[in-house]
Amino acid sequence: MMNSYLYLAIAIISEVIATTLLPITMGFTRILPSLACGIGYASAFYFLSLATTNIPTAVAYAIWCGAGIVLIALIGAMQGNMPNLDTIFGMVLIIIGVSLINMNTPSLH
């Protein structure tokens, strides 16, 4: 079970890296950033598939999406794109929602 959460963490990090690279690809016209972005997304889905062997898919996907949204927003904030209060409140609600889903869903095994 612990390996599944490690796989999920790798999936999240891979997805965040790939999403961060999207603007650098210039619409997938720059080959190296585009390849890195594609590898990041492929890695994200591969590790997400491994995570769902022991974590219910809905739970894994909720954690993956929620963590990705928050991490991308934090990266944006570090680059000077500060979220407004409504956005911050929405992210807090996402964190609460993902936590509730995770606490109230039994594992597959």
Image: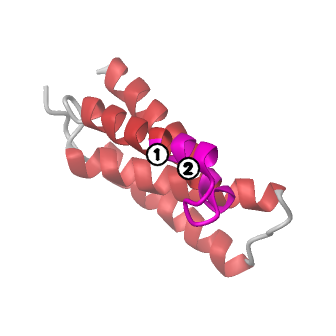
The location of residue 50, given as percent across then percent down, is: 27, 29
Is 104 in front, or is 81? 81
Residue 27 is drawn in which quadrant?
A: bottom right
Residue occupying image coordinates x 62% and y 43%: 32
Q: Is residue 12 visible?
A: no
Q: Is residue 56 visible?
A: yes
Element assignment for label 2 = helix
Up the image or down, 23 lies above or below 89; here it is above
Q: Is residue 30 magenta?
A: yes
Q: Is residue 38 left or right of residue 49?
A: right
Tell which residue pokes out farthest to the left in this image.
109
Residue 51 is drawn in which quadrant?
A: top left
Q: Is residue 93 left or right of residue 61?
A: right
Other-residue count near label 2 (Cα within 10 Å), few / some / many at <14 / 14–19 / ≥20:
many
Residue occupying image coordinates x 49% and y 40%: 40
Magenta span: chief secondary structure: helix
The location of residue 3, given as percent across then percent down, is: 35, 19
Labelled pair 1, 2 in contact (Cβ < 8 Å): yes
Question: Which residue lies under the disc numbered 1?
Answer: 38
Inspect the image, locate mark 2, and give the three-letter code of the amino acid beneath it. Ser
Question: Which residue lies under the disc numbered 2?
Answer: 34
The location of residue 33, given as percent across then percent down, is: 62, 47
Element assignment for label 1 = helix
Distance between mark 1 and mark 2 Cα atoms: 6 Å
Magenta part of the chain = 21-38
Residue occupying image coordinates x 26% and y 36%: 49
Q: Which mark is residue 54?
A: none
Residue 88 is drawn in which quadrant?
A: bottom right
Q: Is residue 15 magenta?
A: no
